[in-house]
Amino acid sequence: MFAQRVLSGMRPTGALHLGHYHGVLKNWARLQDEYPCFFFVADWHALTTHYDDVHIIGRNTHEMVIDWLAAGIDPAKSVLFVQSQVPQHAELHLLLSMMAPLSWLERVPTYKDQQEKLAEKDLTTYGFLGYPLLQAADILIYRAQHVPVGEDQVPHVEFTREVARRFNHLYGKEPGYEQKAQDAIKKLASKYARRYKELRDRYQEQGDPGALEAARALLAESSGLSREDRERLSGYLEGGGKVILAEPQALLTAASRMPGLDGQKMSKSYGNTIALREDAKSLEKKIRTMPTDPARVRRTDPGNPDKCPVWDLHQVYSSDATRAWVRQGCTSAGIGCIECKQPVIEAVLREQGPMLERAQQYIDKPSLVTDILEDGRQKAAAQAEETMRDVRDAMGLGRGG
Ligand code: TRP
Ligand code: SF4
């Protein structure tokens, strides 16, 4: 079928912090060695909640891309771009909006949740309701198989799959589709053709998912099929039409609960973050002033690491030996809290070192970032346009000729 491809996006809503680094960016950096990856700045998505405060979006976009590059997202491996620079996303969103049932959108859990959470904002807008549909367009336009996201976004990927299925069902059945599928089968080597029919029957009669998978693998291997025929036969397996839009899978990021400065999860809304490129002085100060086990009022009072947010950071940053030193020193009042925090400060500084170094060239020469995004825009637009041609065709949108 389509080449394996990874796509993910992030809204440019402020400086990224170490929670983003450990929870998202390290994962992206790893994925770019395994798959072709597309990573984009979801600036239109930011507008759905920040439509009344648009000035920060441009600046945040630039800074966020520097954060990505600092974290090791490599423009030589991945395509980095800005959503609003590829207007095909909007075109697909519009076309999908014609067939997306309103009830599906109203049922997406983030719709009501976010409205309640951001009660100070009026989110009873058309754009906000359409947020998951825009996200579906982002994903489907690149025919991405894998969408690395956190747990909160899984319903959006699930919604995307439903939209793709409905689309293929409505528009994948070209005139004479049954005949075309039969003709395509004849183009397979006879051994493969027999096997394909067997597997298709087994799937259709018994619903055996193993047969479906085996048939898909067979199609992927068989050379000599045009892309069109391959899509046709892939759709024909499930009794639907041609697969025009591929169903993606959420690639659930292993829940990394990066602790913040106060023991809660690190999050901008809790004000407990360390920025990915936090200045060293400010970083030291933030960690030095972190709360500790409240039982340690005086230096001579023993403490309990399990009641201390600093201990959570030792879990992320320290070796077994350092942790043993902390536990022993804390419970016996052998070390003071400032002493205990020092290895954490050093570890965070060490982690930041290569990131700051990578970021420096982009700070010195901002046009490098612009160039990377322009290169990404071109690559993304080429892919997006390829999908849109199939979509327009399937929906009967031609030049009237
Ligand atoms: N909704 C995502 C978030 O808030 C951002 C996003 C927009 C996205 N489009 C996407 C993520 C497409 C993955 C794929 O984090
Ligand atoms: Fe926390 Fe370390 Fe102080 Fe113990 S010694 S209370 S673990 S900061």
Image: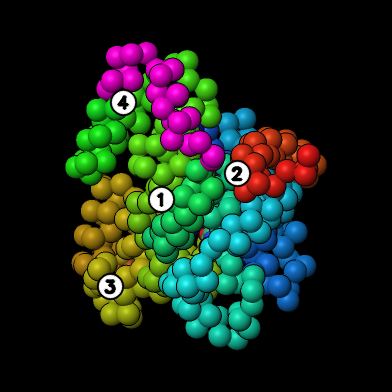
Asked whether 176 falls inside the magenta stretch, the response is yes
In the drawing, does residue 201 fall left or right of residue 397? left
Does 107 appear above or below 67? Answer: below
The Cα–Cα distance between marks 4 and 3, rounded to whole angstroms, is: 60 Å
Q: Find out whether the residues at labels 1 and 4 contact each other: C-beta distance under 8 Å.
A: no
Magenta extent:
174-196
Q: In front: 304, or 26?
A: 26
Tell me, for residue 394, which label it has, or none. 2
What is the three-letter code of the residue carrying label 2?
A: Ala
In the drawing, does residue 142 fall left or right of residue 202? right
User: Which type of secondary structure does the marked residue at label 1 adopt?
Assistant: strand
Between label 3 and label 1, give the one nearer the viewer: 1
Residue 39 picture quarter? top right
Q: Name the residue tied to disc 1.
A: 250
Q: Earlier in the sequence, mark 4 or mark 3?
A: 4
Residue 54 picture quarter? bottom right
The Cα–Cα distance between marks 1 and 4, rounded to whole angstroms, is: 28 Å
In the drawing, does residue 84 fall left or right of residue 114? right
Tell me, for residue 307, which label it has, or none. 3
Tell me, for residue 215, which label it has, or none. none
Q: Find out whether the residues at labels 2 and 3 contact each other: C-beta distance under 8 Å.
A: no
According to the image, what is the colour scheme of the structure?
rainbow
What is the three-letter code of the residue carrying label 4?
A: Tyr
